[in-house]
Amino acid sequence: MFSRGFFLRLCVYLLFSKTEAYYGYGLIRCQTTSSSDIFYLEQIYFNKKLVAQYNGTLGKFEGYTNYAKEIADQLNKNQAFLKQEKKNEMKCTSNAPLMDVLLSKTVEPSVRLQSVEAVDSRHPVMLACSVYNFYPKVIKVTWLKDGQTVTSDVTTTDELPNGNWLYQMHSHLEYTPTPGERITCKVEHASFSEPKLYHWDPMSESQREKIAVGAAGLVLGVVILLAGAFYYYMNKPGRELVPTNDVNTCNPNPERTEE
């Protein structure tokens, strides 16, 4: 964690400096590089500006304001403090195998494309392409009209964490339908070998349900009709069932025998 002396000195800087800082916070993290190397990083921000940090790759503190530079120089001369920072840094390297496993895993997103109510829009239709439960965080969602990328009337949220290492994101497209036009949501993610396309079906879910119910009712009606016709045929007036007799017990033309 942050050095007590480092943090106290920066708090004094926050209270008595002429920068009139009102908001300060610190970040501690194991940072990965493009070459998958991991290093330890401590950072202090005032008013969203980075004023000082400890970088494990350099093994020392750096200050980015005059006062923070003075504090960093004092801390870099304190061997006991630097030794503690090295211990903190070892926690990153010791957990590197676990981080490699986590970073190597991908979770394929589930995608739902649906129409939503358009509020205060000059277009009558709004589509939502919602992407759920994916990892890693980086993802790209693009709207297409007849294969051409759409950039206007599109709003997209940031990648929102679910709190379980997975993310979700939602993109909305406002548009005016044109006959024969195909609307597509294209999703690109590390879990896909190639981008996946999700085409919009203008038929609403309620319409599909009505059609399904109607089709089921039609099939049931046909079954009942056939059953009724069969029953009527088997029991219509004037039709008698003639029993068949075994040829061995009944002779229709018996010959008389002489006495």
Image (cartoon, rainbow, N blue to C red):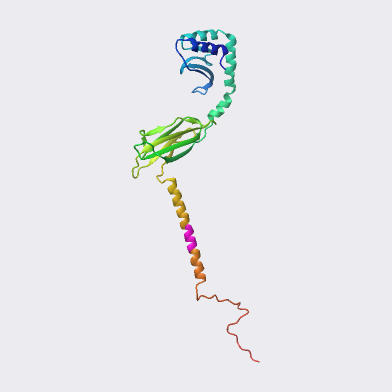
Q: Relative to residue 215, is residue 205 depicted above or below? A: above
Q: Is residue 25 magenta?
A: no
Q: How many marks?
A: 0
Q: Which residues are magenta?
A: 219-225
Magenta portion: prevailing SS class: helix
Drawn side of residue 113 relative to residue 54, left or right: left
Residue nearer the viewer, 232 or 147: 232
Q: Place residue 118 in its image quadrant.
A: top left
Q: Relative to residue 97, is residue 242 depicted above or below? A: below
> What residue is at 48 percent from the left and 55 percent from the top?
216
* Residue 116 on image: x %, y %: 42, 40
Q: Quadrant of the C terminus?
A: bottom right
Q: Residue furthest right?
A: 259
Q: Relative to residue 5, is residue 178 depicted above or below? A: below
> What residue is at 47 percent from the left and 52 percent from the top?
213
> What residue is at 49 percent from the left and 61 percent from the top?
223
Q: Relative to residue 254, is residue 136 depicted above or below? A: above
* Residue 207 on image: x %, y %: 43, 48
* Residue 157 on image: x %, y %: 44, 31
Q: Quadrant of the N terminus?
A: top right
* Residue 208 on image: x %, y %: 44, 48
Residue nearer the viewer, 52 or 98: 52
Residue nearer the viewer, 167 or 96: 167
Q: Residue furthest bottom?
A: 259
